[in-house]
Image: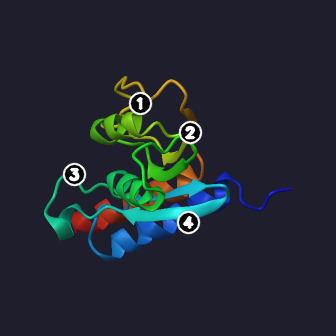
């Protein structure tokens, strides 16, 4: 049995989300994996960079592409704690990921929830460690409101 399953890598993405939380960023984290090896780690940086496009997925795509030396990630899996938004879904389409695994769903802003199509060869797995990802987001926004 392979110890490097979807839960293992989603835990790594959640570690990134916790880093974002500590920085005052919306706690979304991502990792990109190829051959059971993490080649990119990222979390939201929109506040730090004052850049609305600095989502975890965008940071992860850029880091993975730089690591591999090419724009297509068709041998890679992205693990992200929250369903990608419309902007990120578009970028993920163009990167041609082999697989996307996400934790919590985002019925209001999630690209899949809003009908955005990902690349036809991209496998999608949802709900991996969704409770942990949802609780972290709820905790963050609850803290922001008080």
**Residue 81: percent from left, percent from top:** 47, 53
* Tag 2 residue: 98
* Discs 2/3, front: 2
Q: Which circle's residue, 3 or 1, is located before the other in the chain?
A: 3
Label 2 vs label 1: CA separation?
Answer: 16 Å
Q: Is residue 96 left or right of residue 55?
A: right
Name the secondary structure under disc 3: loop
* Tag 3 residue: 53
Label 4 vs label 3: CA separation?
Answer: 22 Å
* Discs 3/1, front: 3
Label 4 vs label 1: CA separation?
Answer: 23 Å
Q: Indicate whether 102 appears above or below 40.
A: above
Q: Indicate whether 46 appears above or below 104.
A: below
Residue with the most extreme bottom position: 22
Q: Indicate whether 144 appears above or below 55.
A: below
Residue with the most extreme right position: 1
Label 2 vs label 3: CA separation?
Answer: 23 Å
Residue plotted at (53% across, 40% down): 74
**Residue 144: percent from left, percent from top:** 24, 66
Neighbor class of circle 3 (other Cα within 10 Å; few <14, some 14-19, many 20+) is some
**Residue 72: percent from left, percent from top:** 44, 42
Q: Which mark is residue 112?
A: 1
Q: Which circle's residue, 4 or 1, is located before the other in the chain?
A: 4
Residue with the most extreme front position: 69
**Residue 78: percent from left, percent from top:** 51, 49
Name the secondary structure under disc 1: loop
User: Quadrant of the image for the N terminus?
Assistant: bottom right
Q: Which circle's residue, 4 or 2, is located before the other in the chain?
A: 4
* Tag 4 residue: 12
């Amino acid at each position: 049995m392979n110890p490097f399953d979807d839960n293992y890598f989603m835990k790594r993405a959640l570690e990134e989300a916790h880093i974002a939380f500590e920085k005052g960023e919306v706690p979304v984290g991502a990792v990109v994996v190829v051959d059971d090896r993490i080649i990119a780690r990222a979390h939201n940086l929109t506040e730090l960079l004052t850049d609305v496009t600095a989502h975890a997925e965008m940071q992860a795509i850029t880091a993975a592409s730089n690591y591999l030396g090419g724009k297509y990630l068709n041998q890679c899996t992205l693990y992200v704690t929250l369903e990608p938004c419309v902007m990120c879904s578009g970028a993920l389409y163009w990167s041609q990921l082999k697989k996307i695994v996400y934790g919590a769903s985002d019925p209001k802003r999630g690209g899949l929830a809003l009908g955005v199509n990902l690349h036809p060869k991209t496998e999608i797995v949802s709900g991996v460690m969704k409770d942990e990802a949802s609780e972290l987001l709820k905790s963050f926004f609850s803290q922001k409101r008080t």
